[in-house]
Amino acid sequence: MHSITRPLIGFPGGKSTVSEKIIKEFPKEYNKFCEVFAGGASVYWKENKAKERVINDKTKEVMDFYKKFKDTSCEVVRNCDMDLSMEERKNACNNREKSVCQYLQGNKFAFNGLCSQGLSHKDRAMSNVKRDCEKYKEKLQHTKILNQDWQTIANKCDKKDSVIFLDPPYVKKSFKYPHEGVTPQEVCDFARKSKAKVVITYDNDPSVRKACKGLHIKKLPIKYSMTTGTLGKAKKVNELLIKNY
């Protein structure tokens, strides 16, 4: 499997800046990898050891995009027009049945990768998508792409030779996600009983530490490259990396 350096799309809370650190925490041997709250699937794109892969998210539009992308020729992708007026950017975002190009246009021009967060007037390239199109397509061709409840998929992946990566909505969050209502207690209860190797990333909140007590917890310094302050510097925080092994 070819190495992929960047996620195909941007998504709030993505782990692209720490995906390699997360993968280093994986066991040396495993057969299946499941990213259950995929979104931009930062860890999935960097992971290259598994023989089977599953990505899942309740954001239907995102998972539909991945399915469409794997069946779209790279010639079409490379010809996606990114020289758009603000009105054309809005139209790309507002289209309910987006083509691959329309989704990419909306994602690249939207703040935090979400059209609901507003659109930027700045021109943005998608050089990684055009450069690595075949690599993205190849990986997606060999991946199950699902749009179901997280527990359903986690239970299906719950086998001794599996790694399950969980990046659920954080306790303190700035965005509304389709996975609303997921609690640290149920996430960590799943990890405790799971036969698989479970790796979780969470915000460093007392409720998370309490709910996940007894599991292996360490700090995970992270830089949010999509969240910038008034000086244009990426926000740096300490989050938590939690494992059941």
Image (spheres, helix red, strand yellow):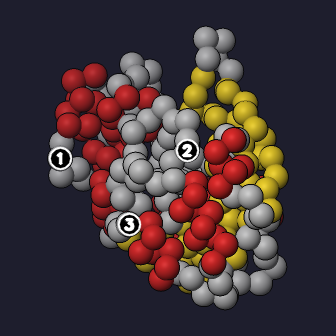
* Residue in the image at 65% along x and 49% along y: 208
Residue 210 appears left or right of 57: right
Question: Reading the chain from its start, which is encountered first: label 1 or label 2?
Answer: 1
Q: Which mark is drawn over residue 96?
A: 1
Q: Amino acid at mark 1?
A: Arg
Q: Amino acid at mark 3?
A: Asp
Assign the C terminus to one quadrant of the image: bottom right
Q: Secondary structure at mark 1?
A: loop
Which marked residue is nearer to the observer: mark 1 or mark 3? 3
Viewer-nearest residue: 208 or 166 = 208
Disc 3 crowd rating (10 Å Cα; few below 14, some 14-19, many 20+) is some
Residue bearing mark 3: 149
* Residue in the image at 67% along x and 40% along y: 205
Viewer-nearest residue: 102 or 97 = 97
Q: Amino acid at mark 2?
A: Tyr
Residue 108 drawn at (x, y percent): 42, 37
